[in-house]
Image (cartoon, grey):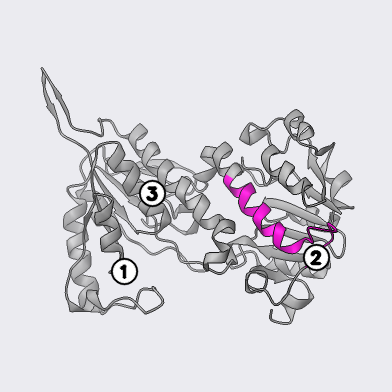
Amino acid sequence: MRLAVPKETRSGETRVAATPESVKKLKTLGLDVVVEAGAGAGARFADADYAAAGATIAPDAAAMLKDADIVLKVRGAAPGEIAQLKSGAVLVALLSPHSEQAAIASLAGQGVTAFAMELLPRISRAQAMDVLSSQANLAGYKAVIDAAAQFGRAMPMMMTAAGTIAPARVLVMGVGVAGLQAIATAKRLGAIVSATDVRPATKEQVESLGGTFVAVMDEEFKNAQTASGYAKPMSAEYQAKQAALTAETIKKQDIVITTALIPGRAAPILVTEEMIKTMKPGSVIVDLAAGAGGNTPLSKPDEVVEVHGVTIMGHTNLPGRLSTDASSLYARNLFNFVSLIVDKKTGALAIDWNDEIIKGAAVAGAPAAAGA
């Protein structure tokens, strides 16, 4: 059975869905692995390394996709790629199912079974396949590194014969995987770190990393989380109090990192223009939600802009700015998923549609269309 890894076609995408390391593992499943020439160039993986790992190098996508039984990608297939896939093929990628519904419909029409890796259920058995977590970890780290590079001062406190340099103050808004890594990275660089989130359980996580938790700690906040760990809607009164506290906190910050994303919806505004106007000249905002509308109204996707003396960084693919590590982690995630759908003895497809991981990720294919 043939597994194909084409070159990514989305503008600015530097990651690749398989590495020489993962090719070796895929070969142990009995798969014939074909990699398009130059597919790993953006992540610094050479064709020769893929060949040494046992992959066949194809000159172009058309030569490999027409016979591919499984196709691994980082981003969803473009219309031209979908047309090249054979009926019965399996596509595994980040498919943006909330915003790319037309592409998913095209995949279904082509007879392709498609799995969207961002829809994996958040269960312990799926952790080794969790691409959102592996990529968000790198995004949180890179957000701090980018901010430090842009910021015109040092991050840690420095005591010199000429005087003392005060440490930078960093506020992280949103304490998910990316936010926690941003807190840890900023602390390692010597900054004074604070963080805010609408879920009470995150307070302990922030403090365990050495950060200060910023929230109006009243009774409503203490009960603002469901049993399953999701945030409850807050009253208008609480939102007003929290906004006032956030506005007062932001005035004192040198760097603000925002991480709030809601699948299928525009990103919530966390930092208003009025708040930005109160920030110190030379401050930096890194908006991890710039591709979904932004956590500030002034963010621009894939641009670095200066507004009211504040630099706002809107890179939409932060993991891709660490393409080698991002590709390595992503490729391991995909290998673990492929291991679920391939019979290890025969190397043939063996999709168990009763597996909750398979059902959760499926967006196209006969069982998916039936509601699997």
Under circle 3, the secondary element is helix
In the image, is 169 to the left or to the right of 177? left
Q: Looking at the image, can residue 54 be seen?
A: yes
Task: Report the residue that reaches farthest toward the bottom.
Answer: 370
Q: Quadrant of the C terminus?
A: bottom right
Q: Is residue 118 above or below residue 138?
A: below
Task: Report the residue that reaches farthest toward the front.
Answer: 345
Mark 3 or 2: the one toward you: 3
Q: Is 284 covered by the magenta stretch?
A: no
Under circle 2, the secondary element is loop
Q: Which residue is mark 1?
A: 199
Q: Is 345 covered by the magenta stretch?
A: yes
Under mark 2, the amino acid is Val
Under mark 1, the amino acid is Arg
Residue 112: which numbered mark, if any?
2
Looking at marks 3 and 1 on the same chain, the residue that comes earlier in the sequence is marked by: 3
Under circle 1, the secondary element is loop
Looking at marks 3 and 2 on the same chain, the residue that comes earlier in the sequence is marked by: 2
Disc 2 versus disc 1: distance between alpha carbons? 39 Å
Find the magenta span and give its range: 329-350
Q: Quadrant of the N terminus?
A: bottom right
| Mark 3 crowdedness (10 Å alpha carbons): few <14, some 14-19, many ≥20 | many
* Location of residue 342 in the rendering, given as x and y in whole percent from the top left corner: 77, 60
Q: Quadrant of residue 241?
A: bottom left
| Mark 1 crowdedness (10 Å alpha carbons): few <14, some 14-19, many ≥20 | many
Q: Which residue is mark 3?
A: 181
Work out whether residue 86 or residue 237 is closer to the camera in this orientation and state it.
86
Looking at marks 2 and 1 on the same chain, the residue that comes earlier in the sequence is marked by: 2
Which residue is at 52% across, 39% downward? 321
* Location of residue 34 in the rendering, given as x and y in whole percent from the top left corner: 82, 43
Which residue is at 78% across, 52% downward? 29
